Image: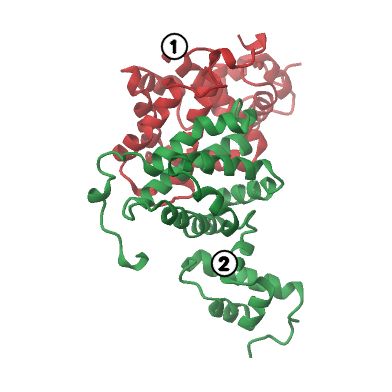
Chain colours: A red, B green
Amino acid sequence: MARRSGRRPGSPDTREAILTAARTAFAEKGYDQTSIRAIAAAAGVDPALIHHYFGTKDQLFLATMNAPFDPAEVLPRIIDGPREETGNRLVRFILTLWDSPAGAPAAALMRSAVSNEWTARLVREFVVTRILAHVVKGLDLDESEAPMRTSLVVTQIVGLVMVRYIVKVEPIASTPPAQLTAAIGPTVQHYLTGDLPAGLRHAELPARTSATS
Amino acid sequence: MARRSGRRPGSPDTREAILTAARTAFAEKGYDQTSIRAIAAAAGVDPALIHHYFGTKDQLFLATMNAPFDPAEVLPRIIDGPREETGNRLVRFILTLWDSPAGAPAAALMRSAVSNEWTARLVREFVVTRILAHVVKGLDLDESEAPMRTSLVVTQIVGLVMVRYIVKVEPIASTPPAQLTAAIGPTVQHYLTGDLPAGLRHAELPARTSATS
C-alpha cells in the first residue's frame, strides 16, 4: 500500500511528490521533528525509495531547498583555525560562495525566502540547525548565549549579502573580498566571542524550554 | 498640448500616470538628474499639476515608493546629539519605525526591492540621496570615506530589519529594542566613525568622478 498504483517509482512525479512532502514537513515541524518515514507516508512512497533517491535526511533537506552548498563540507573551513579569526573566515567563506557559480542559486533562495513564508521557514531551519548549531559547538560557546550571538551574526551576514549581491549598493558591491572581510569580519567576531551588552548575557537570559537542550 | 484630452486632471488615472512616469525617471536617471518638467512631459501633464498633487520633487519621490516616513522629519532625531551615540540613535530609530504602524508598508517596500530591480533602484536612490547624504553632512564625515562607511552601515541595518521583521529569526525577533540597540548600535557607530581597515581609508580610495561632488 505504500506506493500509489498510478505513480511509477522512477518518474519525475515521484521525486517531486517526495520533495513537496519533505518541504511541507520540514517547514511545519522543523528538521529535528521530521522523519523520513513520515515524509514517505505523506508522499505515498516507500521510505527506502527516499533513501535511494536522496540519501540521508540531511541530504533530502538540502535537496528540498536547492541548497547551494553542503554545510558538512564547508563548516570545517569556517570552524577550524584560530578562534579569534572565526569572524574573518566566516565572512571570507560567504564572499567566496556568492562570488562563485553557487552564487546565483543562493541569490534565488534568498529572494524566495523574502517573498515566501514557507521558503523563509526552510532557510531559517537550514541556517539554525545545519550551520549555526555546528558553529556553536565548534566554538564551544555558552549555550545560553549562543542563540543571541549567532543571530546577531546572521544580521550582519544577511545584510552584507543583500547589499552586495541583491540590491547592489556601491561601493560594497565592488569592494575586493579581502578588504570587505577586514571591514566586516571583526563585527562578526565580536558578536561571536566579544562582550554582550547587559540584559543579553548568560545569567540574564530567560530559561529556555527543555525540549531543545 | 501638455494635457491629453481623454484624461481629466483630477482623476486617479492622472495621478497614477504621474507616479509611473516619476518611478521610471527616478529609477533610470537617479534623483538628482530627474526634473519635474521631464516627468510632466512623460506623463503628458502640466508641471504645475504635479506640484499641485505632490508638492516638491522630494515629496513626489517619497510618493513614488510609498515611503513609510519623510527623512526630512526624522533625520534631525538621528543626527542631533552626541556624535559618539549616533549609532545607537540610528538603530533605535529603525526599531521604533518598524515596530510602529509604518512597519507594514516598510516591510512591503523591502520585499518588493528584493524581487523587483526597479524598486531596488528606487530604494537605493532613496537611501543614498535622501538619508545617507544627510547623515554624512551632519556627522561631517570625510567625503572620500563616506560612501564606504555609510554602505557598511546599510549592511548592518538591512540585515537587522531582514532578520527581525522579514524572516523573523529568534531571539532577535523578540529581543527588546533597548537591548538590541545596545548590541548593534556600537557596530553602526564603528562603521561611521571608527578606524577603517587598510585599503579603505581616505588616501587609498580611488578618486571619485566629479559629477557627484
Q: As rendered, which of A48 and B134 lies closer to the eye? A: B134
* Relative height, residue B95 to residue B109 (above, below): above
Tag nearer the camera, 2 or 1? 2
Quadrant housing residue A16: top right
**Left or right of B199: which side holds B85?**
right
Q: Identify the residue at horizontal 62%, vertical 77% (top origin).
A: B43
Q: As rendered, which of A46 and A118 lies closer to the eye? A: A118
| Residue B153 place in picture, x, y as percent | 45, 43
Cα gap from disc 2 to disc 1, whole angstroms: 51 Å
**Left or right of B202: which side holds A198?**
right
In this view of the protein, can residue B17 be seen by the observer? yes
- Residue under label 1: A140
* Relative height, residue B92 to residue A31 (above, below): below
| Residue B70 place in picture, x, y as percent | 61, 58
- Residue under label 2: B58
Quadrant housing residue A6: top right
Q: Identify the residue at horizontal 59%, vertical 72% (top origin).
A: B56
SS at mark 2 in the image: helix
| Residue B25 place in picture, x, y as percent | 53, 70
Q: Quadrant of the N terminus of chain B?
A: bottom right
SS at mark 1 in the image: loop
Say which chain tag 1 marks: A
Could you tell me the amino acid type at mark 2?
Asp
